[in-house]
Amino acid sequence: MTEQRNDPKEDPIFPESEPLVHIQKPKVDPDAENRGSKENNETWTSRWAVDPKMQKFVKFSKMCQLNRLFGHIGRWVAINPYAFLISALIMSSLCVGMFKMELRDRVRDGYTPTTSPSRRETDILRNFFGSKSDPIMTIVLLLARDKGSMHRPEYMAEASRIHEYIKGNISITVNNDEFTFYNICKSACQVNYFFEFLATEFDKIATGEINKNVPASKRLDFPITKIYGIDMHFERNLFGVKVAENETENHLLQGPLAAIHNYSNIRGIEIIQLNYKGDAVGVVDEEDLARWEMALYKYSREEFKSDLIELLVIGSEIVDYEMNKESQMMGRFVGLGFALMIIFAIGSNALNSYYYQSYSFSINIVSIVATLCSLLSVGVTLGLYGIVGMRVNSVMLIMPFLTLGIGVNDSFMLAHAYFRHKRTSPNVVSLMQSTYAEVGPSITITTLTNVVTFLIGAMMPTAEFQLFCTAAAMALGYCYIFTVVCFGPTLAIIHRQKPLLLMDQVKIKMRDRLHSFCEAFVDGYSKVMCSRLFHMFNFVVFTTYMGFAIYGTINISAKLDTEKILPGNSVIKRPHQMLAHKVWFEYYPLQIFINKPFNLTNVQQMNDFDKMMEEYYSIPNNKGRRYTTSWLDEYKRYFNDSIEIFNFDFHSEDGVTKDQGERPATGYDLRFFKGFLSNPIYKHYESLIKYTNASDWENITINQFTLTLVYAGLSDWQGRIDIMIKWRQIASKYEKSLDVSVWESNGMFVDQMLSLKQVSLQSGLLTILCMLIVCIIFIQNPLGVLAAVSSIGSIVIGVIGYLYFWDLDLDPASLGAILMSVGMSVDFTAHTIYAYLRKKRHVYENGRNVVVLLDSEFERMKNCVSSIMYPMFQGGLSTVVCVMPLLCIPDYIPLVFFKTIVLVVIFGLYHGCVVLPGFMVLFTPVTERWYENLKKRFSNKKENHAESESVQLTSINKLTEDGVLNP
């Protein structure tokens, strides 16, 4: 240990800094001008050294160092603490914006990347149907309360009554006008026509209006029956249907039900599904459509009454509402987390201050302010969101737990340094300068990396997590500011209060024993960390840890289980399960769009279209041509009937087929197109075709059209993902000739899962790259940078891998948690590296600054352990304590964040207290020796170069003196 005295008057700003080296002004020889150039050079160097401007430049350069900059801040805080507190109070006034906060989710598309194929597919759908915004699709499920069949006459009549009431009585007010479903359904008003027809026919049969057996051509059979030439697709509205296996099983039945069985093969219906699709029309916008859906939901929950039927409603706006309602429960748990954090902070800070003989009742105020800084940062962030009109989603309500858990770590580091320096600092100015200079750089690194991490997450093409990550970055940034301008001044104010003198001889002995125990622990721990035997053991442990982590990371599956994301006790969970496991299993429609102008006489286009359809039909889950809704198939039949059988067009102006030439090579053209669309049987296809009309059929152009195929047997999301990939692969084959696109209502959810691993990898690599840049700027040590980045990567891989063993999948929730873990891991790495790389420490003893040189790995390890181990454990445990209330919320997303935080704390403490110190002990001496040798090598080259120049200059001077070079 080397001691050097440093007069505070000579260095009033940084008493903790290195002693200044003062250059004495050399005596000036009056004959110096007559001396040689060497003496002139020395005189010029001396003048440069004492030049006031150069001294100011050197001093300014030193001030730009991060620790010196924070020393200045600490000095200002000590001199004017109340000014800083007033500025914090002014900044806190932004919390009033929380009263304007809008809580709303977008579950359907908010977690889907903006660059995903489903976005383009949805735009094509919207443009095709002329929608100003995304249409709503509200689904109503009707079930018998007695668990019986819905095909019983009284149940079908009740279902029909409910359907008519929803269409005509559920309304919203827009500009003082009432709008019902009839005003917003646009082209989808008849989407439930097949159910309406079946219910009407069953009612006629039950009332005796139809009481005779009918021919097979007019039967009401499931799944499809042809009535008056129209295919009745009952499978679109009826699910869990039982059909008759033979005609003799109904002889024992009597009454209306027996009559129905004579007309239909339906013997049981479990679910009736009714679809209500609305588009923004006129003054009705997307928000009005959402209000209509919520009006229907409110009716089902509060007003609907029926002794026969159970009414379940689900839609995207309803899901958003339920998610928000459940998320609002987090408010009370934030308060619980805040209370737990205060209790933990009071206890841990009291122990810390007691150890350093600085305990007083004001320590409780310090602990409360430390926690309050994190809470204020959350309030300011949410207030700003409310002021600028940005919505707040349910995931963001987890952000207060994260900020309370992560943000308070900076306060713990600052408090720990404050207690350590308090005994040896002569005044509050010196104390706050030392505290800020020591802790400021490391908390700046951790905060900056946390903010950068979440800002990278905000660049993800996922709207919901953009909101969450932006809010988290803002909250952590504000927490850092509040720590500097609020918590620090609080420490300066309480400095005036003397420690409590409540210690009798027993308590003094207790404290001495505690001090001795801690000193022995630090010595023993440092010796262990410097032991090669321990390094070998730790290598085995770390290798095992990384082996399981890598295995889990490789095998974790990217999938989205929507049932997990929905609140556990939500009323919409049951209808969603019915949709996912019953409705979509029996009926899973795919809508195909042909976006390129289509010419029926173009052989290439027709052949490509037929090949494409065969590929779609060849997928095992396809239900076949019978279930396909295609105007082109119907038009071909209509064309053949018109030209080959009758040679007469019933729907032409004069009823006579004109001589329109031979059939083209494809066999079809548009000569009967107008008659086809004017036919009542096929008129409904007009909404599925966009064409340019003309008086002459040869000039009619089919610009775009759509058709629907039906699939079945898709019981899980993996099956839906696989089939969506196949659909898109087939469509891409015919992009050039047909410009094919596909649309399915779950396409956005599928894209969420397909993009998860790619987004995770890109975000992770970009985050680590930013961490690398930040560490290079602030740590300024190659070994430290390598250790920091490697440990961050190791922690993140460990979190992902062990989440796999904890039965979690890679989904949007876990992706956000993983990004959070990258930022959190910095807290456990930067402090350790920054503390270990310090080669000296400064203490104030007997009225003077003493520089203690850390000239061995053991001494550096002791300094590192005593500086950061306690606050590191304090911060890690406080984070776990703060998020423990999340266990009280029976939802998936809070559970994911809790598990992730626990893993980050465990692995972070392991790396910060074991892996990183061991790594630095092993490799720091080697790298420092290499650096010194490299520096000496360059120094020798410079000296040799300078000597050669001096020899040349001397030779020239001598030649000049001898007159050889004189003219």
Image (cartoon, grey):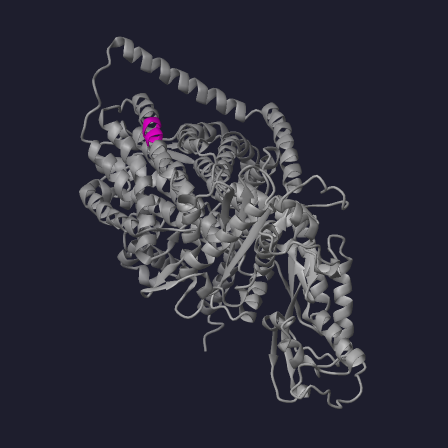
Relative height, residue 388 to residue 694 (above, below): above
Residue 236 position by quadrant: bottom right
Please provide percent x and percent y for residue 131.
50, 68
Residue shown at the point (27%, 48%) measured from the top left: 95
- In the rendered image, residue 113 lying in the magenta stretch gets the answer no
Relative height, residue 959 to residue 627 (above, below): below
Residue shown at the point (31%, 26%) measured from the top left: 346
Left or right: residue 772 compared with residue 211: left
Residue closest to the far top: 506
Relative height, residue 98 to residue 48 (above, below): above
Please provide percent x and percent y for residue 507.
28, 12
SS majority, magenta: helix
Q: Quadrant of the C terminus?
A: bottom left
Please provide percent x and percent y for residue 167.
47, 58
Relative height, residue 290 to residue 85 (above, below): below
Please provide percent x and percent y for residue 136.
49, 59
Judging depth in this view, the residue of 122 and 19 nearest the camera is 122
Judging depth in this view, the residue of 328 and 65 nearest the camera is 328
Task: Inspect this view and state whether residue 39 appears.
Answer: yes
- In the rendered image, residue 342 lying in the magenta stretch gets the answer yes
Task: Inspect this view and state whether residue 16 appears.
Answer: no
Residue 880 position by quadrant: top left
What span is colored magenta in the figure? 339-344
Residue shown at the point (63%, 45%) measured from the top left: 257
Q: Quadrant of the N terminus?
A: top left
Residue shown at the point (77%, 76%) measured from the top left: 641
Left or right: residue 706 compared with residue 104: right
